[in-house]
Image (cartoon, rainbow, N blue to C red):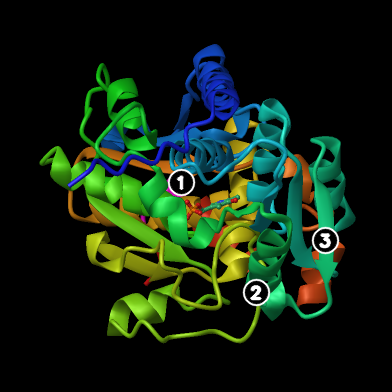
Amino acid sequence: MPTVDVDRSDPDYRSWLKEAVRKVQADANRTADTHVLRFPLPEEWGIDLYLKDESTHPTGSLKHRLARSLFLYGLCNGWIRPGKPVIESSSGSTAVSEAYFASLIGVPFIAVMPATTSREKTRLIEFHGGTCHLVDDPRTVYAVSAELAAESGGHYMDQFTYAERATDWRGNNNIAESIYQQLRLERYPEPAWIVATAGTGGTSATIARYVHYMQYDTRICVPDPENSCFFDGWRTGDAETDCATASRIEGIGRPRMEPSFVPGAIDRMMKVPDAASVAAVRALERAIGRKAGGSTGTGLWSALKIVAEMVAAGRTGSVVTLLCDPGDRYLDKYYSDSWLEEQGLDIAPYAATIEDFLETGSWPV
Ligand SMILES: *Cc1c(COP(=O)(O)O)cnc(C)c1O
């Protein structure tokens, strides 16, 4: 039988691909790792609480890591092509970070988003050279993204499907490996708990898998905001669980069980009231002088509750949570009392809980 040999390799494409991958890798190489900050707790508790500060990435959130992974995955799979657009359904930080990487490698970027998206977010996407494609019905963002990709010969990134697999969960300086490296000289270098909130679910999947792979004893807790199906879906094991109302905590909480959310890897989940998330993020500013987004508050509330349980059990050790993005994006939301009133959120009882806890070590039951 004669040899059948089809060679589709195009030297121009291969040199473009090499150059694009180099640019994305160079971005990682140029930028330093993110800091781990301490949240001050009374010395006599023998417990250390840390925040991995993801707000210091070039595009200001933990989505910088995701966007980098998705671009490398798409490039190395041959899905992202020269001159063809990258498309994403995201109204938030993912689109901002992806617009940055698209511009870095010189391909167009289109974010498909609900028409109600805040002007601040569309401004940031456009600042990084992206285009915003607005749709009236928010439920159509996935289908419209896929359509746009098909029409243009572009690539639909699909963060909610690919977040968990585009990231190297075994290491390669992912967020989990980085946390363990940075805690190496601490008195409790292996955290008792790592707390991570979920939007795509990718961050919690990466951390949990890494912990199991490395055979650590660390437990993983995922706190969920009010308007999200993740908590119920995790508890019941029902993959069809949904939630009709949109989350008020930007970046986390989803209406459907996203494919990137890996429930089996997670030890514990907590439902956190939105008012508690806001109270916690404001307490963060009093404690360390930094503003952060609402999801950081959700994680911090949950981490403080876990610290309280450790105090009550007479247990020492460390707990890690994430500072996901900076608060200056949300001055007219989580830092605005009129927004709280509009939303019917009363943070006073939760603020009192945190204040009392930091003074006395006890958490109301
Ligand atoms: C995306 C996001 C998260 C959650 O991260 P995932 O890896 O998508 O689960 C938390 N906070 C903010 C601000 C985010 O944008």
Per the image, the residue denoted by label 3 is 133
Per the image, the residue denoted by label 2 is 143
Disc 1 on helix, strand or loop?
Answer: helix
Q: Position of residue 53 (x, y in %)?
A: 52, 32
Say which quadrant the C terminus sits in. Answer: bottom left
Mark 3 within 8 Å of ligand 1, using the beta carbon? no
Question: Residue 252 — which label?
Answer: none
Q: Is the residue 349 above or below the residue 240 in the image?
A: above
Identified by mark 2, the residue type is Ala
Q: Earlier in the sequence, mark 3 or mark 2?
A: 3
Taking 207 as reference, is 81 left or right?
right
Question: Residue 359 — which label?
Answer: 1
Disc 3 on helix, strand or loop?
Answer: strand
At a point 41% along the width and 45% down the height, the residue shown is 166
At a point 63% along the width and 48% down the height, the residue shown is 94
Identified by mark 3, the residue type is His
Provide the residue span drawn in magenta.
Answer: 357-362
Give the distance between the C-alpha atoms of the residues marked 1 and 2, in whole angstroms. Answer: 51 Å
> In the image shown, does 301 or 246 lie closer to the viewer?
246
Secondary structure that dominates the magenta span: helix
Give neighbour class at mark 3: few <14, some 14-19, many 20+ (Cα, 10 Å).
some
Q: Position of residue 250 (x, y in %)?
A: 65, 59
Kindly indicate whether the residue at mark 2 contacts the one at mark 1 (C-beta within 8 angstroms): no
Kindly indicate whether the residue at mark 3 contacts the one at mark 1 (C-beta within 8 angstroms): no
Identified by mark 1, the residue type is Glu
At a point 27% along the width and 61% down the height, the residue shown is 266
Mark 1 vs mark 3, foreground winner is: 3
Q: Is the residue 78 above or below the residue 18 in the image?
A: below
- How many numbered marks appear? 3
Q: Position of residue 247 (x, y in %)?
A: 63, 71
Give the distance between the C-alpha atoms of the residues marked 1 and 3, in whole angstroms. Answer: 49 Å
